[in-house]
Amino acid sequence: MLTPTNLVALFVILAAAMAAVIVIKPSVIATKAGKIFAFAALLVIPALAGWAGLSAHVEKSKETEFCLSCHVMTPYGKSLHIDDRAHIPAVHYQNHLVPHDRACFTCHTTYTMFGDYNAKLHGLRHIYIQYIGTMPQHIKLYSPYNNRECLHCHEGARSFEEGAMHNLDPATLPAIKSNKLSCVSSGCHETVHDVANANKQTFWKEGAK
Amino acid sequence: MMERRFRLSAIFLLCGFAVELATLFSAHPAAFLVFFGIGGFFLAAGIGLYLLTLLQTLVPRRMSQ
């Protein structure tokens, strides 16, 4: 199948074949055409192949499998299967409100101009901590969860705009939209990745029916 | 001399491409680290050596003209 990763792999194989020509027969650079070939094989194509590889890895780092491959993230992955509608990440994951293969990234990126880059910079820090640094006792967000991330999908949706609790007080909806009242405040959608009590929960078995 | 350096540059690049291909299909932080650290080093070394060789051969030629 011709996936983007497969395309990158094909391009890398082509780049390797071009570099191999110079390894096997370096005398090709003696002619003018050979010099142009060397320019492509040793500069332009490798730079593009490197960039394509980096992009492919950045895309892969958005996958749920990538996030959950670190041992410390296992309970958070497990919490996506909690069989309780009060658990916000679980409801989103189980009902395909977020893509299954990008469940973590969809909610944990920031929907701003450089949000993806910020998320990736945080990701680099996580990789450093995973392999070199010290793992913190309790994992917490860098800053309180911003409603902007929820509103990216929910703003304008009937279930959100006309939700009974959202309209109980006319000041509630504007307060949510301006991030003055957090979506995950106590009494609202407060149960998010409750890993501490996960062993008391029942779990949804994916594909059981 | 130039041919030898270009050949070395191509060898570095081949090592970089091998690392890139080996890590490309894995969705694991270690694969990213290996690609970025080892693959990136080989790719940068190959491209850098090629550019350095070009500079060293082109600049003296210009100076003598």
Image (tube, grey):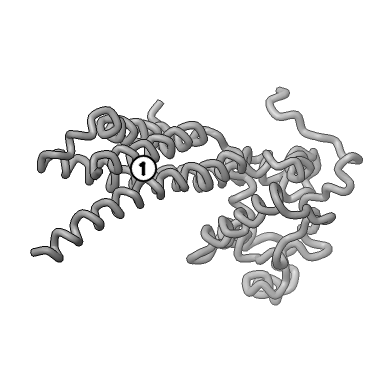
The chain identifier of the residue carrying mark 1 reads A
Residue visible at 71% across and 45% down in the picture = A91
Residue visible at 30% across and 35% down in the picture = A19
Residue visible at 61% across and 61% down in the picture = A149
Q: Secondary structure at mark 1?
A: helix
Q: Position of residue A34 (x, y in %)?
A: 15, 39
Is the N terminus of chain A in the top left, top right, bottom left or bottom right quadrant? Answer: top left
Say above or below: A192 vs B65.
above
Foreground residue, A187 or B14?
B14
Foreground residue, A34 or A110?
A34
* In the image: residue A33, left or right of residue A94: left
Say above or below: A90 vs A110.
above
Q: Position of residue A95 (x, y in %)?
A: 65, 40
* In the image: residue A169, left or right of residue A6: right
Label 1, residues with CA under 10 Å away: few <14, some 14-19, many ≥20: many
How many numbered circles does the render carry?
1
Is the C terminus of chain A in the top left, top right, bottom left or bottom right quadrant? Answer: top right
Say above or below: A176 vs A78.
below
Foreground residue, B17 or A126?
B17
* Residue that sits furthest to the top in the current view: A209
Location of residue A79 by image quarter: top right
Q: What residue is disc 1 on?
A: A49
Location of residue A64 by image quarter: top right
* In the image: residue B8, left or right of residue A190: left
* Residue that sits furthest to the left in the current view: B65
Type of amino acid under label 1: Ala
Q: Does the rendering let one see residue A159?
A: no
Q: Position of residue A132 (x, y in %)?
A: 70, 51
Say above or below: A95 vs B64.
above
Residue visible at 79% across and 42% down in the picture = A75
Q: Position of residue A101 (x, y in %)?
A: 58, 39
Q: Does the rendering let one see residue A42?
A: yes
